[in-house]
Image (cartoon, coloured by chain):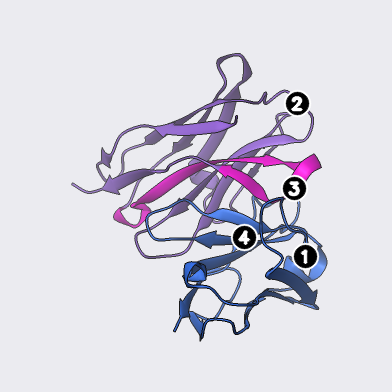
Chain colours: A purple, B blue
């Protein structure tokens, strides 16, 4: 059974750096076709892709946020870490960790974490 | 502003059909077959209901169907049921230099 869980601070001050960790189980990020990504959703607003990392360490980012984001994986620890710099109140959102299997569902996201609400405020 | 354009709301009576559109560009929806749709109930994580434009994951009723024409993808929900009332988001692959794009979401109300 695949599970993903986000962890990190719930409150961050403007200009600070946010580090979120996705701890997962039930799959290996070394398996061909597998990817883990981050998506966020501001309260009452739409979903937004942030970044995704593939089994082969290929990384993709939102073009508008690329300069502020870094995604890394620790396959042995079954974790993926997202770092976002220079936080702004507009970054207040629920951040989801997600799983994709290119072989099974192409670019569809088949598993989501429960999400973690991050508030940016002084 | 979202990369893909969806109507903010849609509605229908039980048993009826409703179609939700998702308009992008030739760089995303129009350029690939990798359009997916998600259903999100309040306070819950989204659920994949359509991938690759028209395919359904196992367990998703065939009342949900997807299609695409040019730069616009569509989700049709037939035989509307009360539990179909939710927000629906489309998403598309957008090339090798992009993590992906989403639509702004459509709130479906079952009257």
Real-space Cα distance between discs 3 and 1?
A: 11 Å
Real-space Cα distance between discs 1 and 2?
A: 26 Å
As for residue A94 lying within the magenta part, the answer is yes
Q: Nearer the viewer, mark 4 or mark 2?
A: 2
Q: Can you say whether A93 is above or below B15 in the image? A: above
Q: Nearer the viewer, residue A72 or B51?
A: B51
Q: Can you say whether A94 is above or below B101 in the image? A: above
Parent chain of label 4: B
Task: Tell me residue A38's x, y (percent).
Answer: 53, 43
* Res. B105 in view: no
Q: Circle 3 sits in a helix, a strand or a loop, which is it?
A: helix
Residue B54's tag is 1
Q: Nearer the viewer, mark 4 or mark 1?
A: 1
Task: Tell me residue A33's x, y (percent).
Answer: 77, 35
Q: Quadrant of the C terminus of chain B?
A: bottom left
Residue that numbered label 3 is attached to: A105
Q: Which residues are magenta?
A: A89-111
Q: Nearer the viewer, residue A62 or A103?
A: A103
Q: Nearer the viewer, residue B31 or B35?
A: B35
Parent chain of label 3: A
Asked if badges 3 and 1 are on one and the same chain, I answer no
Instruction: Report the number of numbered marks.
Output: 4
Residue that numbered label 2 is attached to: A31
Task: Tell me residue A21's x, y (percent).
Answer: 45, 29
């Amino acid at each position: 059974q695949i599970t993903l869980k986000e962890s990190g601070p719930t409150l961050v001050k403007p200009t600070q750096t946010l580090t979120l960790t996705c701890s997962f189980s039930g799959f290996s990020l070394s398996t061909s076709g597998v990817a883990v990504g981050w998506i966020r959703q501001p309260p009452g607003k739409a979903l937004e892709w942030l970044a995704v990392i593939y089994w082969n360490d290929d990384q993709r980012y939102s073009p508008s946020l690329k300069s502020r984001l870094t995604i890394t994986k620790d396959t042995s620890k079954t974790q993926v870490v997202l770092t976002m710099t220079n936080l702004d109140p507009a970054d207040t959102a629920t951040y989801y960790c997600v799983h994709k299997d290119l072989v099974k569902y192409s670019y569809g996201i088949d598993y989501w974490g429960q999400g973690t609400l991050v508030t940016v405020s002084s | 502003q979202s990369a893909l354009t969806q109507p903010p709301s849609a509605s229908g009576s039980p048993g009826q059909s409703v179609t939700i559109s998702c308009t992008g560009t030739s760089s995303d929806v129009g350029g690939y077959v990798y359009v997916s749709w998600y259903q999100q109930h309040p306070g819950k994580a989204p659920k994949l209901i359509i991938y690759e434009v028209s395919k359904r994951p196992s367990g998703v009723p065939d009342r949900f169907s997807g299609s695409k024409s040019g730069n616009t993808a569509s989700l049709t929900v037939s035989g509307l049921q009360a539990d179909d009332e939710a927000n629906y988001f489309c998403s598309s692959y957008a090339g090798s230099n992009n993590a992906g794009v989403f639509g702004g979401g459509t709130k479906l109300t079952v009257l």
